[in-house]
Image: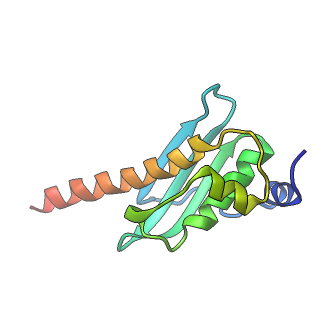
Amino acid sequence: MYSKKVIDLFNNPVNAGRISKPDGIAENSNEDNTAHVEFSLRIESNIITEAKFRAQANPYIIAVCSTITKMILNKMANMLFLDEFNVKNTLGDDSPIDIQFCIDCVKMAVDDYVEKMAKSSKAKA
């Protein structure tokens, strides 16, 4: 079944919800559409200062999203590195469930921020 840490994060998710007026936001689903996640980010001077998630998924994916939000806080958005091994290792659970779509969603939220910044700087020019 699930590890103690996964069960704890499912019952007490960290950073669940959505940031009002996020700097970057994205949503993604897994291949078979059984899980859907959304990440919203607050980014100041290229540093991720706040991260939240919403998920319609199994307990493992909810724990993964919670873990990811903790892992990316205070990291530089343009230097963000996440991989399945690190997330699963942090959770202490090597479930065969594919979590790459969660990692991709965070990267898409960062890309959304970058696009908004590019549009903003073009508008100022």
Residue 47 percent across, percent down from the top left: 42, 72
Answer with the quarter of the image where residue 124 lies: bottom left
Quarter of the figure that contains the C terminus? bottom left
Q: Residue at x 61, y 33 (%)?
A: 30
On the rendered structure, is 122 left or right of 24? left
- 22 shown above or below 97: below
Q: Residue 99: x, y in percent?
A: 64, 43
Image quadrant in which you'd find residue 100: top right
Tell me if residue 92 comes above or below residue 100 in the rendering.
below
Which residue extends farthest top? 32
Please, which colouring scheme is shown? rainbow
Residue 16 in sight = no
Q: Is residue 60 visible?
A: yes
User: At 57% across and 41% down in the image, what residue appears?
Assistant: 101
Q: Residue visible at 55% across and 63% down?
A: 51
Point out residue 73 in the picture as x, y percentages from the top left corner.
55, 70
Q: How many marks overall?
A: 0
Q: Nearer the viewer, residue 97 or 120?
A: 97
- In the image, 44 versus 80, the foreground residue is 80
Rendered residue at 69%/52% (across/down): 64
Q: Nearer the viewer, residue 60 or 57?
A: 60
